[in-house]
Image (cartoon, helix red, strand yellow):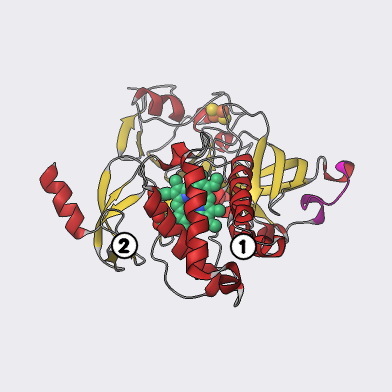
Amino acid sequence: MPISHVLSFEGGRVETQEDESVLNALLRAGLNPAFSCKSGSCQTCMLQAESGDIPERAQRVLPMHLRRLRYFLPCRCMPTSAMSLRRPHPNDLVTGCQLCEANVQEDGRLELVFETGRPIKYRTGQQLRILVTGRDDEPVLTLTSSPERDMLMIGIIDAQAARHLPPEMQGQMSDEEVFGFAFEVRGPFDDVPPRELPSPEADATLWDELGGDTRVRAVLEAFYTKVYADEQLAPFFVKVTRDRAIDKQFSFMKQCVTGEKIYMGDRPRNAHHWMIITHELFDHRQSLMLATLKEHGLTDELIARWTAYEEYFRPDIVKSAKLPRYLGDQPIINTSGVTREVIGESTVCDHCQSEVLAGETVLLHHHMGTISCGRCADVEAVAE
Ligand code: HEM
Ligand code: FES
């Protein structure tokens, strides 16, 4: 009688047939394992055995640290016992890479273009951690390339984190020194929260020098009139009234400039999480702002001090892929539908604008990232 072994994987079970590899058994059972070459060279199918014997042949080509962690290649594995299997943990997946380009961006962030020693299965917006000798805090690189479109991988690193990289990766060496520089990454991860920029320093006299509340409000009214008439910017604002945009911008900027705690609302990273805003679009917004500030007779020196606050948030706003919205440090992965969530930080209801305190339960609309407080949620439930 042929010998068969039970494989368990992600809640499913399958009994192997004679001469059947672990990969083929999982595929036959519809358990959706990753694979590509089916012949032991691409390593796409790699899994970890929580229990069971691993034949030597199924591990031979893997690096020692992965063998010790009981990783193996299911396409090269004829099972000799029952096995309990799981997908690789991103922390364990160290991949050797070779640098092609390191470019410092206008906003100080670093862009790396590189090739990997083995294919990495990833999505745009996921993150890799770069291994740096002697450091535990591994700089986080957010992937901006697309696996369908790009042959090479491209990622962006914060200016601050980039300082911990070897000089060859910091974008200040010659092309010859950069090209082919070897480094290692872990990942990809879904859950390394991008650093949210802290508040900029207040500028004690600026608000008054600008002309105080009256002049700033007049500037913002004129600015948003331009924005709502602008064919590139208006589409972002279809669900927002002009008055709300003005009020939010007014209190946010006043809080930044004066340091007074008057703004209730999302910080820029969350507020713009679903908007794909390029540097060109950001520049275009700034050109409308510049024109408005000039029309209101402000000097170049005042204009520079005001726009420095807006420029400060460029890294949180410009991006080539949507970000998840964060509740505290937790990314909200589900991007469709509506769920009830306990809120981690105080904020305001996107419907009635009343304050929502940390710990309250809100209704979260995943696509737009808007929340409804308990009262509005009840009204919505009745309307449904
Ligand atoms: C091209 C550039 C930008 C575009 C297209 C844009 C677009 C938008 C849109 C559509 C909203 C409304 C979101 C909503 O209510 O759901 C919004 C809100 C906001 N934006 Fe921007 N924005 C840009 C640049 C900026 C800059 C430079 C700043 C600050 C320096 C900023 C600060 C804010 C703030 C504070 C809010 C309110 C957040 C809230 O409702 O809680 N934005 N932006
Ligand atoms: S599928 Fe390529 S190594 Fe297993």
| Res 299 → quadrant | bottom right
Q: Which mark is residue 343?
A: 2
Q: Secondary structure at mark 1?
A: helix
Is residue 173 rendered to the left or right of residue 357?
right
Residue under the point 68% across and 53% down: 107
- Magenta stretch holds residue 372: no
- Density class for disc 2 (Cα within 10 Å; few <14, some 14-19, many ≥20) is many
Q: Which residues are magenta?
A: 167-175
- Location of the C terminus (image quadrant): top left
User: Which residue is labeled 1 in the image?
Assistant: 306
Q: CA distance from mark 1 to mark 2?
A: 33 Å
Residue 252 vs residue 178, the one in the foreground: 252
Is 226 drawn above or below residue 249 in the view shown?
A: above
- Location of the N terminus (image quadrant): top left
Image quarter for ligand 2: top right
Is 135 drawn above or below residue 46 in the view shown?
A: below
Is residue 201 in view from this perspective? Answer: no
Where is residue 162 shown, x and y percent of the image? 70, 57
Residue under the point 64% across and 56% down: 158
Residue under the point 59% across and 28% down: 40
- Density class for disc 1 (Cα within 10 Å; few <14, some 14-19, many ≥20) is some
Q: Secondary structure at mark 2?
A: loop
Is residue 150 in view from this perspective? Answer: yes
